[in-house]
Image (cartoon, rainbow, N blue to C red):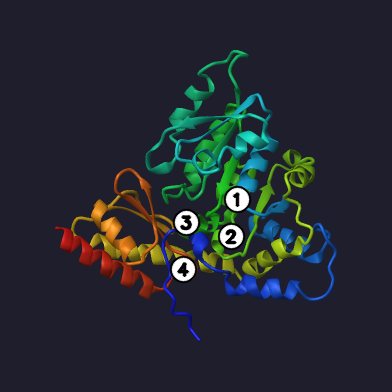
Amino acid sequence: MINERPRHFASDNYSGICPEAWEALASANEGHVASYGDDHWTERASNMIREVFEADCEVFFVFNGTAANSLSLASLCQSYHSILCHQTAHVETDECGAPEFFSNGTKMLLLSGADGKIDPSAIEPMVKRRLDIHYPKPKVLSVTQATEVGTVYTPSELGVLGEIAKRLGLRMHMDGARFANAVASLGVRPRQITWEAGVDVLCLGGTKNGAPVGDAVVFFNKELAFEFDYRCKQAGQLASKMRFLSAPWVGMLEGGAWLKRATHANSMAALLESKAEEIPGVRLLFPRQANSVFLELPKKVIEALHGRGWRFYSFIGEGGCRFMGTWDTRASDVEALAADLRDLMLAAD
């Protein structure tokens, strides 16, 4: 029976487990399997990630994106270093200081740039802002793909950032909580927007893509992965039953479900965008390039939508709202939301 309960648009974390991940999880639940990652599921998932990226990389599985970002950044720098990122980056605005905490005090240096993307011209001035010993030495450039405002870096844009980072002696970190959505949007090989562009470590999101829990930390620069397993253990991120973190990846990667699900999420956001553009008074705040739509709405319309039971985030300025498409969003969900939005906008006019 089809579940007719309404889908919401607040976060792709609202969605459940996609069928492919669920089936793999059920298979991993059969019999006894070695613990702490010494199992065939974890080995298979790691090898599949290597195949996807066409790279001999080190792979670790952790419980969530905060751990992935924070621990990987901590492995790239010392406490007296600094991390350059966009002013809207998730590692700056939504990690509760975790990158600074796990790196024992590394400072975040914020960069500007339109549509959530780092302006390449802003990097070198920040790095050379001060060169004395009293200032935290810049060591890492962190980029978010897709960005916090739903835009996507192209391979050439990342290549420029990678070249600048290399020239300035910076390591390059990528927060890829919605990496699958970026790949689906661009239609490129994953390697083109990671190690070929200069990325040293990628935090590969699984939860938002349909996994039950867990993200992967992928070190393309294997030297930087030295003793990362100890870092995970100390931080409480070494799962005793690791197969339940890694098995869903097997289900999602085998047969390309991870991109199929991301493509669907993107298409649902595109459908909402097209419906919103037809409604007088609704303004698109950022280009829609992945699975999020940012709209500017009157306060009373926002309140009325909430009153009708719709859940979405409103955290950008006075009327900025974010609507997320997910792997299981239905066209009928989008149509229903758009219909309510149209009614309320007309009533508010």
Of tags 4 and 3, which is closer to the observer? 4
**Sequence-earlier tag: 4 or 3:** 3
Q: Looking at the image, which residue sits at the far left?
A: 349
Decide if residue 256 is on the left or right side of residue 300: right
**Sequence-earlier tag: 4 or 2:** 2
For label 1, the SS is helix
**Closer to the camera in the image, 184 or 280:** 280
Answer yes or no: is residue 186 visible. Answer: yes
Q: Looking at the image, which residue sits at the far front?
A: 307
Of tags 3 and 1, which is closer to the observer? 1
- How much space separates mark 1 and mark 4, taking CA atoms? 22 Å
**Sequence-earlier tag: 3 or 1:** 1
Of tags 4 and 2, which is closer to the observer? 2
- How much space separates mark 4 and mark 2, taking CA atoms? 16 Å
List the residue tagged with mark 3. 186
**Closer to the camera in the image, 201 or 148:** 148
List the residue tagged with mark 1. 65
- How much space separates mark 3 and mark 2, taking CA atoms? 21 Å
List the residue tagged with mark 2. 207
**Closer to the camera in the image, 7 or 217:** 7
List the residue tagged with mark 4. 264
- How much space separates mark 3 and mark 1, taking CA atoms? 22 Å
Answer yes or no: is residue 279 visible. Answer: no
Q: Amino acid at mark 4?
A: His
Which residue is drawn at the image coordinates 76% and 52% (left, top)? 238
Is there CB contact under 8 Å for labels 4 and 3? no
Q: Amino acid at mark 1?
A: Gly
Q: Amino acid at mark 3?
A: Leu
Q: Amino acid at mark 2?
A: Thr
